[in-house]
Image (cartoon, rainbow, N blue to C red):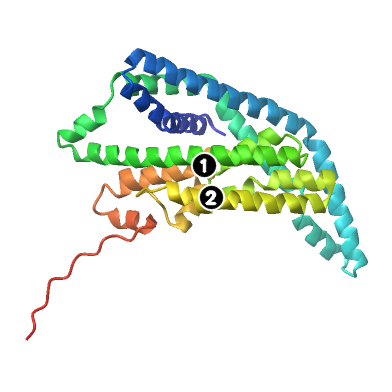
Amino acid sequence: MSQYAAYILSITFAILIALAVDPLVNWLRSKGVHRGAVLVIALVVVYVALALLALLFIYGGAQFLRELPTYTQQAQQMTADWQASLQSLGLDSAGSAAVAGQADLSKPLNAAASLLQSLGSVLGNFVTLILLTTFLFVDIVLWPGRVQETARRGHGYARRLMEFTIDLRQYIVVMVIVGTCIGALNTVMFYLFGVPYPLLWGVLSGILNFIPFIGFWLGMIPPAVLTLLAYGPERMLFLVILYVAINGFVQNVIQPRLVVTRLNLTPFFNLVSATFWPLMLGPAGAIVGVPLTMAVRSLILDADPTTRWLADLTSSKLPDLPSEPPTSDQ
């Protein structure tokens, strides 16, 4: 990942962190807490959370990467066994190798390792992330309401930025709550099933909840593969069924009741967001892909009348049609 991509990721994560902590800042203000104390409390919460995440992904990821060659060897041996089974059923050597190669379990483990390294690099770039987050909170806490005041004076783009920030904040707060619930439930489940590094995969599954559609499955694949390698297909099948039940209930029953925002994208552009931004920013770009696409749509495409139709195409809400003039009866 280039230095430019790492810096863009750090800025994006700093903004999302500020939006996620904004309810705490507003609550402290409503209680009459002094601005300086609000700033200190908010920064302490952020620093502790980032330190714990950095410790988990750097240390836990390093432990997993150290054991990755062993898991890869086990996966390759299982693939070879599948190839031998296919040959015993009458499939020739080339055909059995092609079929078994498509089910090579080492590939998803290597992909998980790449994602952990990408997240570790973002959190490992701690100085940049901390500096950006600190000074962003200084602006928000010590000089609040500047965008609102600019919008009140009649600046249209400032009003658009204010509305977008409000909607994005609601989206981020809800996703953090849902991701925390999913991460906690999955961590307990992985621990009970004996999955290696249950806390690592549980927290990762909660973070991957930010990736629409495919994040659900990406969070399941590494622990499912490790369970298959360690305990066999029966336990893996039970793990997958319980994972789908827990995460499906949270995402399809609880989450839609909480997310009420005008920023929803169509399923196609959700998928584009989850696959385009990783090409630009590395694997961690999939996590911030939807907010970045929302920003492009609301602040760039929708702001220009000549490109507003493109913004309408990405929205899951149909644009309002112009009312037809009443027709008089002849």
Above or below 317: residue 154: above
Q: Residue at x 20, y 64 (%)?
A: 322
Q: CA distance from mark 1 to mark 2?
A: 8 Å
Viewer-nearest residue: 41 or 118: 41
User: Which comes sooner in the sequence, label 1 or label 2?
Assistant: 1
Q: Of residues 181 and 140, which is closer to you in this image?
A: 181
Q: Quadrant of residue 208?
A: top right
The amino acid sitting under disc 1 is: Val
Q: Position of residue 131 (x, y in %)?
A: 45, 19
The answer to whether residue 204 is visible is no
Q: Amino acid at mark 2?
A: Gln
Name the spot of residue 196 as percent of width and height, x first. 76, 36
Which image quadrant: the N terminus? top right
Residue at the location (43% across, 28% down)? 21
Q: Which mark is residue 251?
A: 2
The outermost residue toward the front is 31
Q: What residue occupies the far bottom of the structure in this picture?
A: 330
For label 2, the SS is helix
Q: Is residue 232 left or right of residue 39?
A: right
Q: Residue placed farthest to the right in the image?
A: 88
Q: Are marks 1 and 2 in contact (CB under 8 Å)?
A: yes
Position of residue 13 relative to residue 256, above or below, is above
| Residue for point 52% across, 48% down | 274
The crowding category of the residue bearing disc 1, from other C-alpha atoms within 10 Å (few below 14, some 14 to 19, many at least 20), is many
| Residue at which label 1 appears | 178
